[in-house]
Amino acid sequence: MNIGIIGAGRVGLTLSIVFKRAGFSVLVASRKRVSAEKASRISNARAVEIPEAAKADIVFLTVPDSEIVNVARSIENVLNKKQTVVHTSGVFSSEIISFLPSRTCALHPLKSFSDPILSADTISGTLFTFDGDESAFSVISYLVEKIGDRIVKIKPSDKPVYHLAAVLTANYTVTLFSISKDMLEAIGFTDKDANDALLNLISGVVRNIKNRGAVDALTGPIVRGDAETLRLHLMHIEDKNLETIYKSLAFATLKIAKKQGLSEDKIRKIEEVLNG
């Protein structure tokens, strides 16, 4: 079984590395030959042109979401019904490439890919979601299991909600971290001290979620019913957009606090502050 990967960005390079390490024959291609050759040097996959990669038993389209359909159409005449074509978009379902003559599916790794080598080194344990032709599931499951990961089927119509959950956790955690780091630096923290302090804090939060679950892991002023602390926070927010973010997150957090048993009186006082 050989694997063709079209698209030599972060996801494509990561998959090239992990599939090559797992013992598969891997072909990597890109619109820019130099990108494919760079990916080849890092992953030990063989750099080829796109039409050759499209002749593989399993063809991965690891291109930007906006290019998936265009790339699929460009290789349509090369494909046959014995092949499997996979795109790796988190938000779009397999239906966007269902016009191809091959078996089609979507496979998305629920993982951050900021550094392909680090991503490849830590791929084990990643959850992959699958939607598409049932006839493709067994071979795709085999690939995922070979690299030590889990695979879960989801409905094509659920892809946007799935991706939304991933973005809220992964992308916006980075955004909130960056905002908080700027705040600490504004009051005199060095870059290193701010970074280290917040990393230690967030690492503890992740451990608590892992050990106790999201509801019981919640700490802070809202779960304590400390409305005055929230009032002080809001007094010191000058950016209106940040105030909106803070209040929206506070209302969402209040729902978790209710699950922990926060009293109706304290809930009412917090809502008064947030609506104030």
Image (tube, rainbow, N blue to C red):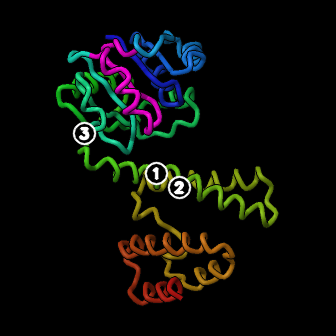
At 54% from the left and 69% from the top, the residue drawn is 245
Quadrant for the N terminus in the image:
top left
Quadrant housing residue 267: bottom left
Residue 53 showing in the rendered view: yes
Q: In terms of sequence position, does the residue under pointer 3 or pointer 1 come before the other?
A: 3
Check whether the beta carbons of the residues at disc 2 and disc 1 lie within 8 A of each other.
Answer: yes
Q: To which residue does mark 2 refer?
A: 172
Quadrant housing residue 150: top left
Give the CA distance from mark 3 to mark 1: 19 Å
**The disc labelled 1 sits on which kind of residue?**
Val
Give the CA distance from mark 3 to mark 2: 25 Å
Q: Position of residue 249 (x, y in %)?
A: 49, 69
At 36% from the left and 31% from the top, the residue drawn is 87
Residue 185 horizontal side relative to residue 87, left or right: right
Residue 23 showing in the rendered view: no
**The disc labelled 3 sits on which kind of residue?**
Lys
**The disc labelled 2 sits on which kind of residue?**
Tyr
Q: Which residues are magenta?
A: 53-79
Residue 33 horizontal side relative to residue 87, left or right: right
Q: To which residue does mark 1 refer?
A: 167
In the image, residue 47 above or below residue 206: above
Q: Position of residue 41 (x, y in %)?
A: 59, 13
Q: To which residue does mark 3 refer?
A: 153
